[in-house]
Image (spheres, rainbow, N blue to C red):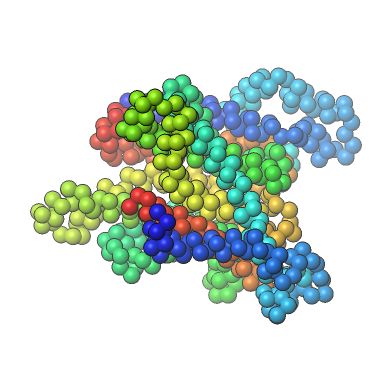
Amino acid sequence: MLGKIIKNKQAVIGLIMIIIVLIAAVLAPVIAPNDPMKVNITKKFQNNSSEYPLGTDQLGRCVFSRLVYGARYSLGIVIPILLVVALLSIILGTSAAYVGGKFDRIFILISDMVMAFPPLVIVLALVGSLGQGILNLAFAMIFSVWVWYAKVVRSYVLIEKNKDYVTAAIIAGSTDKDIIIKHIVPNILPSLIVFFSTGVAGMILMISGFSFLGLGIEAGTPEWGAMLSGAKQYIYSRPYMIAYPGICILFTAAGFNLFGEALRDIISP
Amino acid sequence: MTKYIKKRLIGLIVVLIGITFLSFIMSNISPVDPAEAFMRRNAQTATEEQIENLREEMGLNLPIHTQYLRWLTNAMQGDFGKSLVSNKPVMEEILSKFPATLTIVGMALIIIVVLTIIIGVLCASHKDSLFDNLTKVVTILGVSIPNFWLGFMLLFLFAVSFKLVPVVGYGSIKNAILPSITLAIATSSSSIRLLRSNMLENQNKDFVTYAKARGIPKKKIIWKHIFKNAVPPMITLFGQTIGYMIAGTAIVESVFSWPGIGSYAVNAIFARDLPVINAYVLIMAFIFVICNLLADILNAALNPQMLRESGDL
């Protein structure tokens, strides 16, 4: 598996892009030359210099440092959301498929209802009625996407459940818990990783979109979507201020998409 | 066929009931009391008594299931109450915003279909060519690009630098060009790739080999056999896409200050205008479900044998 990834050019490029963003997020205080929040009105809209590699914004804050710290926000929000969604969907999807019967029918009914709403609409509705704030946004994101993931997990488990080795395990007297944890989950995991990896890209785009709208993340936070939103009034005079955060989002999302798709080709050619 | 449609319609009714239920819950878990919010906004000094009276008038003191039934009966007649901001009927306002959104969604859809068919077929028929590889890179970028950023870049390029289209504004088709392109890029990228892979899958099927053996020209094989059989999954995707786009215009509309349903909903969220949010959610889900259903029925009508294979008939 690992050998195949290294041999696949697309997977390597994607992985390198992801690692660059990860390094930026983890080592942000080391990489960033300045404090991303430090306001200095006398130094606003400065050009590139050794002190400010990408210049400064409307409040004299170092654009480069803010971009580096932005990686923390993007990944720091997406990864916890993804973990919760992964856990929820694996538990619910697996039990619906494995238990079957009435439980499965109720699961299908609920998921059909939730899937009748485009995820964006659910997030807008929930943020609208619960109020803005990052926790509400995270909750709304989880609520809007879990069902799509759980449905996919369920379909994988259904296929796996009817394979001979599971039947053999049942005959051999394995408990349900053992069959699920030791047999089914490890076997569907590669497909799930692919699915979640491309999902990360979508979530990063969604979150940056919401913070661009001003929902969820406070203005002034060095988050890419929020930075873009703050820069939009300077589109004529300082277009680069809009360009940089967008390139960061594009870079991160493209990394996950490239990696996820290459992984899919490796797993199911 | 009629049996299939009947079956789907029964399923639709169940889902629609579920939608109203979920919409109602989502807009009622708000910690804000709508009566109080309304009074604070519209009257400088609202006494407890006035708020209590309004609460009674709005039916907020009734048990929750009665409230739901009341809301449902009104909603079915197109009555979603009045906006807390403008004090006008919500339905009237939403209907007045629809044409703007439908304009850009309609134009985006035309762009998507044209791009998908031309580029998708070219890629599949010239697999691994320079064009195919280039398309692969461009479409990966297309699904990774934040659409609000793309909007700004297009705005900067075509409106500010080249001055080909007006910067912002509403009214003429010219104004709708950039928002439509912005909306179309991501979907075009994913549907080009879907069409390409569907066509490649069909290329190795027996009927194509047979057609080749009969000496049918390559062009005819591509269109009459490979393309035709790759279309059904595309119809399903487009059905879903239309619903997604109508809902997803919120971000694009905000970039271009486009007075459509999406920016209306975003403004309502900032103002915590619950009746508007409520109606928006219900109507969007309704459109989404209907589009999906129409796509499925269209598919079933075009390929009755598909139903037989899947055991739906």
- State which quadrant residue B20 falls in: top right
The residue lying toward the viewer, choosing from B178 and A92, is: A92
Tell me where residue A259 appears, x and y as whole percent: 46, 57
The residue lying toward the viewer, choosing from A70 and A7, is: A7
* Residue at 63% across, 72% down: A240
Q: Is residue B134 visible?
A: yes
Left or right relative to B33: residue A76: left
Tell me where residue B139 appears, x and y as whole percent: 43, 61
Tell me where residue B179 appears, x and y as whole percent: 54, 59
Q: The N terminus of chain A is located in which quarter?
A: bottom left
Left or right relative to A55: residue A257: left
Residue positioned most to the front:
A172
* Residue at 70% across, 38% down: A130
* Residue at 66% across, 19% down: B66
Residue positioned most to the bottom:
A49
Tell me where residue A34 appears, x and y as whole percent: 74, 70
* Residue at 64% across, 44% down: A138
Q: Is residue B142 visible?
A: no
The residue lying toward the viewer, choosing from A204 and B219, is: A204
Left or right relative to A223: residue B178: left
- Where B234 falls versus A4 (above or below)? above
- Where A189 falls versus B224 (above or below)? above
- Where B305 falls versus B153 (above or below)? above
